[in-house]
Amino acid sequence: MFLVGLTGGIASGKSTVSSLLQELGCPIIDADVVARKVVEPHSPAYCRIVKHFGPEILLENGEIDRQKLGQLIFASEDKRRLLNSITHPEIHKAMLKQIVVFFLRGYRYVVLDVPLLFETRRLTRFLNHTVVVYCDPATQLSRLMNRDGLTQEQAEQRVAAQMPLNEKRGLASHVVENSGSREDTQRQVLRLHTKLEDSMEFLLARAIAIATAAGLGGLLLYAAKLLAS
């Protein structure tokens, strides 16, 4: 099994591409979903966030108000870095557990849906392929304003807080152009999925894993014989 990183920019359509891949049978590990789980009330990350950002970011039921927290971190690079330093290690541990499960089930590849894939670069060294969902700046801004009910100034601030899509596009091994119709995006996703499914990279990854497991097994057997002698 090999790993494919999927990323994009805010309102670029990454979630749409992720859903299309899932419909094709691809296992998806969504970093946003994992991120919500690791900050559930009373978790280690939750306690650290409340300690640093204060109880005013909480809803009445004790959960973190993601909108309030988002406003804070989009307005301050230091606060954004602080939040990332708290949540990212927990997110990566949880994602690793899911990767192991999919590996044991025999999938050829797993998609890691990670919004800040290139910003943090903590996962890129483990990926065989990276996919960026791109749309032109005007479309991105329009979608964001309509989706979140933001003013143009607020939308521009959120877009500016992220790495430019053009820069991400230059770093990716595959690009899905999502400025047009959903049908056009579907066709691109199907071509991408077919190319990844036809790849033989999963055989190498599985052979290495089996060899490693066999080596560890032999070492344990040798140690057991020594202890028994």
Image: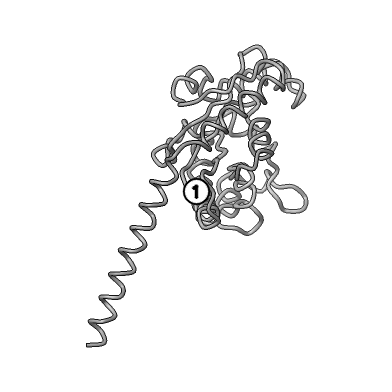
Colouring chosen for the image of the structure: one colour
User: What kind of residue is marked 1?
Assistant: His
Please determine whether, in this image, residue 101 is positioned above or below residue 132: below
Identify which residue, 153 or 178, lies in the foreground: 178
Residue occupying the point 54% across, 44% down: 110
**Can you tell which quarter of the image residue 201 is in?**
top left
Residue ID for mark 1: 92
Residue occupying the point 43% across, 35% down: 121
Is residue 33 toward the left or the right of residue 224 in the image? right
Residue occupying the point 53% across, 46% down: 87
Is residue 195 toward the left or the right of residue 212 in the image? right
Percent of width and height locating residue 28 = 60, 43
Percent of width and height locating residue 86 = 51, 47
Percent of width and height locating residue 40 = 65, 54
Identify which residue, 105 or 129, lies in the foreground: 105
Please determine whether, in this image, residue 31 is positioned above or below residue 173: below
Marks counted in the figure total 1
Quarter of the figure with the C terminus: bottom left
In this view, the residue farthest toward the top is 138
Is residue 110 toward the left or the right of residue 60 in the image? left
* SS at mark 1 in the image: helix
**Can you tell which quarter of the image residue 211 is in?**
bottom left
- Crowdedness near tag 1: few (<14), some (14–19) or many (≥20) residues, C-alpha within 10 Å: some
Identify which residue, 46 or 199, lies in the foreground: 199
